[in-house]
Image (cartoon, rainbow, N blue to C red):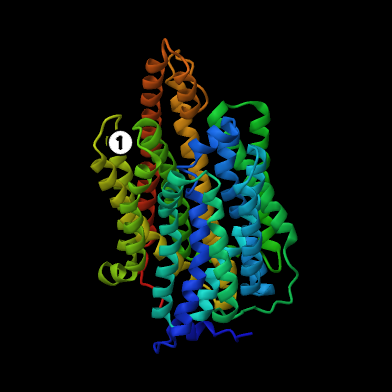
């Protein structure tokens, strides 16, 4: 087991100690990150095929998309702490085994309920992969400049995987059945199992404090009921039961925060949020991924079900944004060197907002270049901001706490994606149903189009009205994401004003 590098050396070391084996180890660590992020978005284009095969209800369809992200978000902080204690490489490989087994179960799921359960297990496995891989990078690259480059590559894999998910999924769906989007995880994980023991060193931080099991329970009891309540209220309206569930979640989160202040070894080190850079980075991860996740899902449905493009064309349309995200994730440190951290953060958020604002120009007949240009602009913004988030968070804590700190940032990433699907997806659905105007729409656009195709008399009119209503819902969700990003940019521009913001050295 390797010895932990002192935080001071990690922050200020100038001589690069990275050799070829370390960079190969980084390549191995990007594999699980790529898979975890891809499995958020890979279903965006597969949902129509899954709907035809398994006939999920509107609620089941959202849970198929959401439960994976909620499971990851609820357990990331826990698994980051577990990795710090039992070994980060060990927890990485254990999570990969569960992730692979659950992927096989999802691929051959005979019903929507089984698919939801498999996605939940994938979430548990995925929760071990993200913080362990990022914290291992903090250990493997003690030199700050090497670490910044490594985190840029890691972020490119994470953000790029989210953007590439629909592309790869669309290409596979063009040739195979929907279950193949899960089976592609298996060979990649096999490479991880074969190479990680040789290229990735083990790290563990000794701790004599008891593990915070109470915090684990309270965090899960807070996150899941609250998000469920928000989803249900947006899709079906408010009733006493849903309101009670939401209030229960709020109460549990309040108890969790109170308990974390007293716990000897808390899951969530609240003192970290006293650092405005750390707090700002976490907020960027949450809001940025909410905007990216929600709009990627909605535009995937738009390209297929509104514009009528086949799944391969819809997938290829996502390539420019995927390239933009990957390239600017790796190049984020150069952007900071030119304009400074504060300007890079705020500017990247505004670019993402501008890209989402451009989606308001999408209509039932708009040219494809409109979609390509504005999603690429958003991709530049997302690539820069997500790379900066990871570097700021990892650079804010001693190396022995990097697993817990990365768990916080990854929780924000994953919870943001899940909230994007839940909140923006539910908002679009609410507008879609409100615009039914007596046509008798189903709960989703896909369900409505399926029924309309069987109606010889008014089917074409119902389909046209449903597509128009969906575009209205997508516009509303896009405007909501623009407002959220704009508010965040304004807040950060003031919060980072107190002192000159520079990259960790």
Classify residue 417 as left or right of residue 118. Answer: left
Decide if residue 480 is in sight here.
no
Furthest-top residue in this view: 457
For disc 1, the marked residue is: 360
Classify residue 277 as left or right of residue 240. Answer: left
Q: Is residue 97 above or below residue 233?
A: below
Quarter in which the C terminus is drawn: bottom left
Q: Which residue is at 59% across, 27% downward? A: 238
Q: Is residue 244 above or below residue 339?
A: above
Furthest-front residue in this view: 175
Q: Position of residue 40 (x, y in %)?
A: 51, 50
Q: Position of residue 499 (x, y in %)?
A: 36, 68
Figure quadrant of residue 206 = bottom right
Decide if residue 430 is in sight here.
yes
Q: Residues within 10 Å of mark 1 (few under 14, many from 20)?
A: some
Q: Which residue is at 48% across, 86% downward? A: 9
């Amino acid at each position: 087991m390797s010895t932990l590098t002192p935080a001071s050396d990690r922050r200020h070391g100038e001589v690069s100690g990275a050799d070829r084996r370390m960079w190969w180890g980084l390549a191995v660590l990007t594999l699980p990150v790529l898979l975890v992020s891809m499995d958020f978005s890979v279903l965006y284009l597969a949902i129509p095929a899954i709907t035809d095969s398994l006939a999920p209800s509107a609620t089941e369809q959202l849970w198929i998309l959401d439960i994976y992200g909620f499971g990851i978000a609820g357990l990331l902080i826990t698994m980051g702490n577990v990795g710090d204690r039992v070994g980060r490489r060990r927890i990485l490989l254990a999570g990969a085994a569960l992730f692979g087994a659950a992927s096989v179960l999802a691929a051959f799921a005979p019903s929507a309920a089984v698919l939801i359960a498999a996605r939940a297990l994938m979430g548990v496995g995925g929760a071990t992969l993200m913080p362990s891989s990022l914290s291992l990078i903090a250990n493997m690259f003690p030199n700050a400049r090497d670490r910044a480059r490594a985190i840029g590559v890691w972020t490119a894999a994470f953000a790029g995987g989210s953007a590439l998910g629909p592309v790869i999924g669309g290409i596979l769906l063009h040739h195979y059945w929907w279950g193949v989007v899960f089976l592609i995880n298996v060979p990649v994980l096999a490479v991880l199992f074969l190479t990680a023991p040789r290229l990735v060193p083990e790290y563990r931080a000794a701790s004599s404090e008891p593990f915070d099991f109470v915090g684990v329970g309270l965090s899960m009891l807070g996150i899941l009921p609250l998000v469920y309540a928000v989803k249900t209220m947006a899709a079906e309206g408010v009733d006493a039961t849903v309101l009670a569930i939401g209030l229960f979640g709020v109460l549990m989160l309040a108890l969790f925060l109170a308990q974390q202040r007293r716990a000897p070894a808390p899951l969530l080190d609240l003192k970290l949020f006293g650092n405005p850079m750390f707090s700002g980075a976490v907020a960027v991860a949450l809001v940025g991924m909410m905007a990216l996740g929600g709009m990627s899902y909605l535009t995937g449905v738009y390209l297929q079900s509104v514009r009528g493009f086949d799944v391969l064309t819809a997938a290829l349309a996502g390539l420019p944004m995927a390239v933009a995200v990957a390239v600017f994730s790796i190049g984020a440190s150069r952007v900071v060197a030119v304009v400074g951290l504060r300007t890079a953060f705020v500017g990247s958020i505004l670019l993402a907002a501008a890209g989402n604002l451009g989606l308001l120009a999408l209509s039932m007949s708009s040219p494809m270049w409109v979609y390509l240009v504005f999603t690429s602009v958003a991709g530049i913004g997302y690539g820069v901001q997500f790379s900066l988030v990871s570097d700021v968070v990892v650079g804010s804590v001693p190396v022995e706490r990097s697993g817990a700190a990365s768990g916080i940032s990854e929780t924000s990433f994953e919870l943001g994606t899940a909230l994007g699907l839940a909140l923006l997806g539910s908002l679009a659905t609410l507008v879609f149903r409100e615009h039914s105007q007596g046509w008798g729409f189903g709960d989703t656009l896909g369900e409505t189009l399926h029924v309309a195709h069987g109606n010889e008399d008014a089917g074409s009119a119902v389909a046209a009205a449903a597509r128009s209503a969906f575009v209205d819902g997508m516009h509303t969700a896009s405007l909501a994401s623009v407002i959220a990003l704009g508010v965040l940019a304004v807040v950060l521009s003031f919060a980072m004003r107190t002192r000159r913001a520079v990259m960790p050295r």
